[in-house]
Image: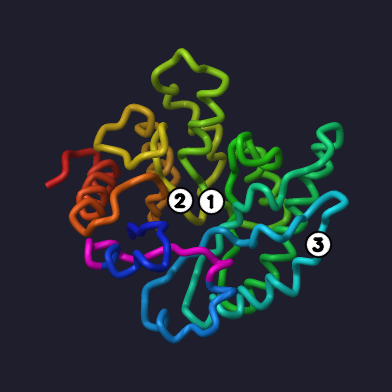
Amino acid sequence: MQFGLCCDFSEFEYALAAGYDYVEGALSGLASAPDLERYRGLPIEATNIFFPSSIRLFGEERTPYLEYARGALAKAGELGVKIAVVGSGAVRRAPDEEDIEEYEDAFADIASELADIADEFGITVAPESLNRSETNIGNDLASLANRLLKRGVSYTADSYHVLYEWNAKHPDQPAPPESLFDTQLPFAPVHVHVATLPRVAPVPGDPKLVGFVRRLQSLGYDGRVSLECQRGSSVEELSAALKNLQALFRGSQPE
């Protein structure tokens, strides 16, 4: 298992000095970079923020996206990126709640288009579920994952968004049942984002994440795990967060 950090490009140096195996940066940032020389040789194995905020996938403001996607993924491929997470909440928001199922299917179809392009550059596209404060499409991870599966597309399991949606329905319960993640992760993801609720770095034995870790282990997941949360930015703070993350997956206290 590899442990990475979702971070701004300016933090790459600190993340790697803190011991993370790789970094995960914004694809939209790479797409707009005038050149890639400063990033060559760095372990940028995953990206998030797939689309810039100027793009809209649905409604009257719908904008072309495939040309942008091809250019962005080509740059990512040059740097050796392996996973491209598709979050981009505002970009994928549906304007009509009455036809939400149609938009859910349309988003999965778009993900399939993106996956076909990404495959040309050796990249796997992996959409993630987002919570309802960010978008109204793809809020339920299990439903999103199964829609993507029908189109041959992988998915990202993000613990925070699953916890956010569960907490919205059960605000008085301190932690979800472990079985929550048995249903929300119907099969193994290709990528993982981790944060607890509230969106901070988890600690070993975090009761909100015990079921998440156990489910990933039962599915045989042994891939990349990216920490995506509010946290400090110094090498010392990032190192401590990494040790806690590793211990969470070992089921032990940090060394």
Q: Residue furthest left?
A: 255
Give the amino acid type for the residue marked by disc 2 in the picture.
Answer: Val
Please report whichever mark, 2 or 3, sits nearer to the chain's N-terminal start.
Answer: 3
Return the x and y of residue 89 as percentages of the image width and height. 64, 47
Name which of mark 1 and mark 3 comes first in the sequence.
Answer: 3
Residue highlighted by disc 1 = 156
Image position of 10 (left or right of 108): left
* Three-letter code for the amino acid on which mark 3 is drawn: Thr
Q: Earlier in the sequence, mark 1 or mark 2?
A: 1
Q: Which mark is residue 192?
A: 2
The residue at the point 22 percent across, 67 percent down is: 17
Q: Are marks 1 and 2 in contact (CB under 8 Å)?
A: yes
Residue 147 at x, y = what percent? 71, 46
Q: Is residue 12 above or below residue 186?
A: below
| Dot 1: element | strand
Type of amino acid under label 1:
Thr
Q: Which residues are magenta?
A: 17-29
CA–CA distance in space, label 2 to label 3: 29 Å
Q: Residues within 10 Å of mark 2 (few under 14, many from 20)?
A: many
Q: Is residue 1 visible?
A: no
Residue named by callout 3: 63
Quadrant of the image containing the N terminus: bottom left
Residue at position x 41%, y 32% in the image: 197
Q: Residue 164 appears at what percent x and percent y?
A: 51, 31
Q: Is residue 60 left or right of residue 126?
A: right
Residue 179: within the magenta?
A: no
